[in-house]
Amino acid sequence: MATMTWETRAKLILSLRYTLLILISAIFIFPIVFMVVSSLKPDLQLLRDSGSLRAFLPIGDISLNNYAFAFERVPVVQFAFNSVFTTVVAVLASILLNSMAAFSFAFLRWRGKKLMLTLIIATFIVPFEVIAIPLLLVVNNLPWLGADGLEIGWLNSYHVQIIPFIADSLGIFLFYQYFRDLPDELVEAARIDGASLWQIYARIVMPIAGPILATVAILKFLLMWNAYIWPLMTVRTEELRPIMVGLQYFFQRYTYWGEIMAYLTLVTIPVLIFYLALQRAFIESIATSGIKG
Amino acid sequence: MTTAAEARQKSPLWVRWLLPADAPLYQRYEAIVGWLMAFPALLVLTIFLVIPFLMAFVMSFTNQRLVSPNPTEWVGMRNFERLLTVRIFTLEPERDESGAVVWDDDGGIAYPRLRTFTRKNPEYPELNGLREFVSWQSGENRTVILAADVVFLRALINTLLFAGVIAPLQGGLALLLALLLNQALPFINVFRAIYFAPVVVSMVVVSLLWRFIYDGENGLLNTMLGIATLGSFQPVDWLGNPYTAMPAMIAMSAWQAVGFHMVIWLSGLQTIPNSLYEAAGLDGAGAWQKFRYVTWPGLRNTAVLVLIVISIQAMGLFVQVDVMTRGGPLDATQSVVYQAVQRGYDKQDIAEGSAISVVLFVVVLVITIVNRYLTRDRE
């Protein structure tokens, strides 16, 4: 070591660092590679291969049969549609409701505003798991005016999966913080020009809220797409079941590992592609939620 | 004809408070628009967050069920007593007439049967209905911890243990990853993206995938350990063994979420000015000393934040249990939220589910207050 120049030592440390980074990557990537590769193999081969490193290689009897079988066994397409539908509606509605409330908090003067804002921030400490059980009682007694007239009870519907989540205090707070840091002149100038408050919201403030809009949308997307505990308790029929509950339901009925891996791959790969495409936005959004929440 | 002022006098007090009469017209207009814009979100939060939250407290003092023909009644603290009653009881050995200890056939000390104390014994009314949670020998006597609800007690201890272990473990690993990544090197963003990737994968997917990895017969983990030890490793049924099930669940949960906290550490690291490291370098500080005297003091608030976020998330432990073990084996992976759902949803006993939710909230509140106290102390 003593004869080593400063430069070779630095190179050695650097290559050690990269070796470590690559080895750690393997821990995160291998389970996912294993999932995708296994989804292409028949069960017998899958079980045999998992006894060796062949588990990570797409070799042997490779086909998309597992995907075809999984589609036949349970209505995967229906589950996927349900998740896409509830996710899209909740994301759009939460952007609208949260940003409107935040606009009001940030720019408009009205009595009781400070108190409301304090209460909203106070709700951060209530995890969903704490309210889930009483919420079940609430939605079971709420009225709904549907195609069949007035009904009591929201259980087993799309709206029970969507409406409780179309506003959230973190979303309001994130928009509020972003709006508060915008220059006051922006809004004041528009007011002097005679723009209505709604116009200021829709034409001036929202168009420049892109970054925070992406954050709120990504957080809501992950929450809705991965929803499990709530739909598990409120949705009973296959036609309304979202994809994650459908996955567990599939697993409880069949233990064909190849098909389970196909199903897992199917629900994960779109999210991973979405994530890789918008990687920076995803990471920043989730970090923001951790720091603020 | 009534004037505007008279109409105001007739309007309810809350309207007069919200829209003061002396305010100019445009201000009253602004107040109305302000309320209208905030109203939809506030309404949703009230119905689906504030009301259920308050109801959790109210319901926990009743016998409310999801659907019941009988009217709901107040039951006082009964739900909490049923959940949380714990007593320590000392069993004294059986003695013969001369006062000597009686020995049983196996050579152990003979004790009176526990159920003679816990089944309607008029001398021990406080033990009625309790069951043995754990017991151990202490001298001649046997100390028994009795609980009214052994499954819930197990769930509470498991969840606290889960949170207590995963917070430092996951937080520490996340810090190591963040330190490895906190340098402007080529491809560093690729590694960051890889480490973070499991965070966006659903916990349901992760749990099912790891069920296969942890499998006792064909599991990937046993295979890997077998290869690493050249075949001398004895396969373990990780989720089927009460001693390994919880550690396996902790390891998997840390794998899934470590990237999240790595990113929080990274943003904390970026707030430490480079000049501090340069100054430390001039003073001859090595890598460890730089970490000890520059990095760590600069990360204190981040550290508290990371530990709090992980432990609060950990208290909500549910998906892993529901998908992987259903609380087993031998209640080794029971969790508070799993029990809340079992009772509140499966048995439709809203009252008991609410009481469990209140216990959960109190724990989360205590964690948050400790957090506030620690961060205030240092500022």
Image (cartoon, helix red, strand yellow):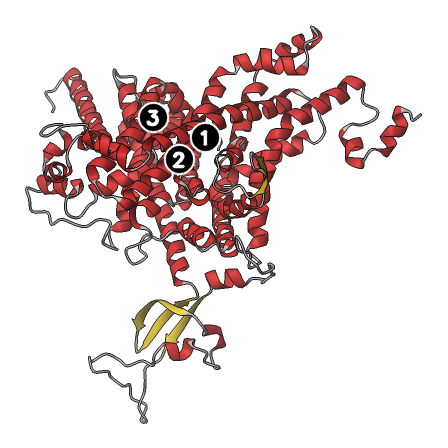
- Label whose residue precedes the other's in the sequence (1 or 3): 1
Q: How far apart are marks 2 and 3 (CA)?
A: 15 Å
Instruction: Name the residue at 59% across, 43% down.
Output: B51
Q: Nearer the viewer, residue B231 or A243?
A: A243
Task: Judge from the rendering whether residue A220 lies leftward or rightward of residue A17; answer left or right.
Answer: right
Are dots 2 and 1 in contact, CB under 8 Å? yes
Q: Which residue appears farthest toward the right when viewing the image?
A: B1
Q: Relative to A231, does residue B343 appear above or below in the rendering? A: below
Q: Is mark 3 on a helix, strand or loop?
A: helix
**Amino acid type shown at disc 2:** Pro
Which of labels 2 and 3 is toward the front? Answer: 2
CA gap, disc 2 and disc 1: 8 Å
Give the residue at mark 1.
A86
- Which mark, residue A271? 3
Is disc 2 in the same subunit as disc 3?
A: yes
* Number of numbered callouts drawn: 3
The label shown at residue A63 is none
Which x, y percent locates residue B125?
A: 49, 76
Q: Which residue is drawn at 50% across and 23% down?
A: A92
What is the chain letter for disc 2?
Answer: A
- Camera-side residue of B79 and B232: B79
Q: What is the secondary structure assignment of the residue under circle 2?
A: loop
Question: Dot 1: within a 10 Å radius of its alpha carbon, few (fewer than 14), some, or many (20 or more) residues?
Answer: many
Which label sits on residue A242? Answer: 2
Label 2: few (<14), some (14–19) or many (≥20) C-alpha neighbours in 10 Å: many
Q: Mark 1 lies on which chain?
A: A
Residue B343 is at least partly visible in this image: yes
Instruction: Using the rendered image, report if marks 2 and 1 lie on a common chain.
Output: yes
